[in-house]
Amino acid sequence: MSRVTTTRRLQLPDGYHFTRTVRSLLVVRYDPCGTFDDRDFWLSARTPEGPGSLHLARAGAELTATGHGPGAAWLVDRADAIAGLRDDLGDFAARAVAHPVVARLAKTFSGVRFPATGQVFHRLLRAILEQKVTGIEAHRAYRAIVKHFGEPAPGPAGLLLPPDPQAVATTPYWVFHPFGVEQRRTQALQRAAVVAARLEQCADSAEATRRLTAIPGIGPWTAAEVVRTTYGDADAVSVGDFHIPNTVAWALAGEARGTDARMLELLEPYAGHRGRVCDLLAAGGISAPKFGPRMPIRSFARF
């Protein structure tokens, strides 16, 4: 299976930033489904044509995409999207000048693009696990689940494939509990796994958002987290986030605290790129003043 390979070469635009573009596709520090550094990026996937892995290798202004396994052709065909090269900034640069903070960040991170993997369930797994917990807790659970359901991915990188939705759907809750995932998130994950095939067939971000939010346990925050990197939706805003409304209110209006409604009001001038503005604020390290204690890092496996 790993001997099936397909290769394609892509020309990169001036100023393109490779690592900042692809890093959002992987869990920080260690992801069993992928790796990246300044010149190389690996990602495993369950494609419509079968399992595969994609290797993106940068050399100057050229990116070489190599696919491995039965899904090689599918992955290489959309390698430019995965690398963010289909992301169209349109008139964003002209609109960014309306606010000095956004203008500065848009210039600093002008080479960052929104990737679009076309893989819904893999990103949905992460997003559900990230609901209402710290990133450390969520990523610990993600790694444990991937390893539990792990199947070797094609190619020489030693990656694991994302969990098979059917396997996730038919696994009893008590298997997930030692991974630190309580029953509420497990049930949401398994409901999504049951309809994973339909989710993967969504034509665009809007259809995916409708189908995702129709699943009990999945709201607008989770849907936005998914479509931002699955479809490269630069307008997707994570409504319901604990930090982002405060960050937007602080950065754009000097207000230490903000509601979802206030956040959307401040982002309205950037309609079509509202998620891009939120990502720029995060990339720039901007955050609102903190007045309370940090959220504790817990493990539901101990409960």
Image (spheres, helix red, strand yellow):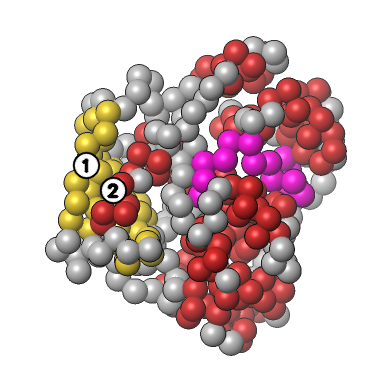
Q: Return the disc, 2 or 1, that comes first in the chain's sequence.
A: 1
Q: CA distance from mark 2 to mark 1?
A: 7 Å
**Above or below for 8 versus 265:** below
* Image coords of residue 179 (percent x, y): 56, 75
Confirm whether residue 187 shows in the render: yes
Residue 76, label in figure: 2
Relative to 291, say whether 118 is above or below. Answer: below
Magenta highlight on residue 237: yes
Splitting the image into 4 quarters, where does residue 132 fall?
Answer: bottom right
Comparing 253 with 190, the one in front is 190
Instruction: Give the amino acid at mark 1.
Output: Arg
Residue 303 locus on image (x, y percent): 70, 80
Q: Is residue 136 visible?
A: no
Identify the magenta region.
229-244
Q: Secondary structure at mark 2?
A: helix
Question: Residue at point 22% right, 36% down?
Answer: 9
Q: Is residue 238 left or right of residue 156?
A: right
| Image coordinates for residue 48, horizontal then vertical, percent | 38, 63
Within 10 angstroms of label 1, few (less than 14), some, or many (20 or more) residues?
A: some
Number of disc labels = 2
Q: Is residue 228 left or right of residue 153?
A: right
Do the residues under discs 2 and 1 have CB atoms within 8 angstroms?
A: yes
Query: Judging from the image, what secondary structure is the residue with disc 1 in?
Result: strand
Residue that label 1 marks: 8
In this view, the residue farthest toward the left is: 3
